Image: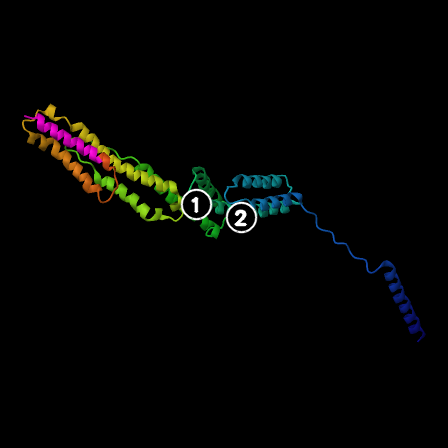
């Protein structure tokens, strides 16, 4: 019993001492939390990636991407991304993958900014073309992912643009055939090219984005007019070549002149109107001048052939 009393007395004294000390110290001492050390190199790269994500979508930022990529590689080679080799490798992959993800998202938006505009600058198209190829080769791209599908769509747009652009180049000029009296203008070939132009225009260049490019529309229209002008140039050249020839041929009769020179040329003029009147717009004044020149030659021949 005596031992129990002594134990209780000691416990009470201990409890009193605890509260006295606590009151003197102002409560329980708090353990100060220390933040883990920050790697200034990885932190700097992460900030640059965030800055890249905030760049505008109306201007390409390939230079910025290459700059950040350079620093990642440089810090990695200098073993500055982690405390050891494992951390250094891990941080390089994390930062590189994050940079690729942010840049590809930005690049795709920038590409479509170009496609949604009326003016497609050749230097922009060249960059889009090359970047698509480069970015699709990356180890960070998952085949069949939304990003990969976006790249495929961009390349599809460029292929349609190239198709029409190449057609414009080859249809720009049409060779003028020989202008012998028995030669005929190959209207079927001309019609095929014009028909393709009309099909492109009717189908809105066969792509909603390519259809925005005003240069393609303008050059298709110009080529159509140029092709029809080529037909007129052929007639102009041919009639110019054969008018006045009645003096050299020394036809015995006026009918002989008509059968050999006038009638074939007149028929070609009529064929032109048949081919073009209902389908194409052409220079009516030029056509009339060519026709009048042939009629004048006929009058001269009538007056001069005995």
Mark 1 or 2 closer to N-term? Answer: 2
Q: Secondary structure at mark 2?
A: helix
* Most common secondary structure along the magenta stretch: helix
Q: Look at discs 1 and 2 and give the one toward the viewer.
A: 1
Query: Is 184 in the magenta?
Result: no
Instruction: Give the side of residue 198 with respect to residue 275, left or right.
Output: right
Query: Is 296 in the magenta?
Result: yes
Mark 2 nearby-residue class (10 Å; few <14, some 14–19, many ≥20): some
Q: The C terminus lies in which quarter of the figure?
A: top left
- The span picked out in magenta is 287-306
Q: Specify the quadrant of the image occupied by residue 3.
A: bottom right
| Count of marks placed on residues | 2
At a point 55% along the width and 40% down the height, the residue shown is: 64
Q: Specify the quadrant of the image occupied by residue 76.
A: top right
Q: Nearer the viewer, residue 24 or 190?
A: 190
Instruction: Give the side of residue 70 with respect to residue 11, left or right.
Output: left
Q: Nearer the viewer, residue 253 or 130?
A: 253
Instruction: Give the side of residue 155 with respect to residue 301, left or right.
Output: right
At a point 29% along the width and 45% down the height, the residue shown is: 198
Q: Position of residue 252 (x, y in %)?
A: 5, 26
Q: Position of residue 52 (x, y in %)?
A: 56, 44
- Let me know if residue 254 appears in the view: yes
Q: Specify the quadrant of the image occupied by residue 24.
A: bottom right
How much space separates mark 1 and mark 2, taking CA atoms? 21 Å
Q: What residue is shown with label 1? A: 115
Mark 1 nearby-residue class (10 Å; few <14, some 14–19, many ≥20): many
Q: Position of residue 178 (x, y in %)?
A: 20, 31
- Let me know if residue 139 appears in the view: no
Q: What residue is shown with label 2? A: 101
């Amino acid at each position: 019993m005596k031992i129990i009393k002594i134990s209780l007395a000691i416990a009470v004294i201990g409890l009193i001492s605890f509260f006295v000390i606590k009151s003197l110290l102002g409560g329980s001492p708090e353990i100060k939390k220390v933040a883990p050390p920050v790697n200034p190199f990885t932190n700097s790269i992460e900030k640059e990636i965030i800055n890249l994500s905030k760049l505008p979508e109306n201007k390409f930022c390939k230079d910025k991407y290459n700059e950040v990529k350079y620093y990642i590689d440089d810090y990695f080679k200098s073993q500055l991304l982690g405390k050891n080799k494992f951390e250094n490798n891990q941080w390089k992959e994390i930062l590189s993958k994050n940079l690729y993800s942010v840049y590809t998202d930005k690049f795709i938006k920038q590409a479509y900014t170009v496609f949604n505009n009326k003016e497609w600058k050749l230097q922009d198209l060249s960059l889009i073309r090359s970047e698509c190829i480069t970015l699709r080769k990356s180890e960070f791209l998952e085949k069949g992912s939304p990003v990969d599908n976006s790249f495929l769509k961009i390349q599809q747009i460029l292929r349609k643009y190239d198709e029409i652009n190449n057609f414009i180049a080859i249809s720009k000029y049409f060779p003028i055939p020989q202008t012998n009296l028995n030669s005929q203008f190959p209207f079927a070939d001309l019609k095929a090219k014009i028909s393709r132009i009309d099909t492109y225009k009717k189908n809105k260049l066969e792509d909603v984005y390519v259809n925005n490019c005003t240069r393609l529309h303008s050059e298709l229209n110009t080529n159509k007019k140029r092709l029809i002008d080529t037909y007129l140039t052929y007639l102009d050249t041919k009639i110019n070549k054969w008018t006045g020839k009645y003096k050299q041929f020394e036809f015995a009769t006026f009918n002989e002149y008509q059968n050999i020179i006038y009638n074939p040329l007149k028929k070609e003029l009529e064929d032109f109107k048949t081919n073009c009147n209902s389908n194409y717009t052409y220079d009516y004044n030029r056509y009339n001048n060519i026709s009048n020149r042939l009629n004048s030659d006929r009058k001269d021949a009538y007056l001069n052939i005995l």
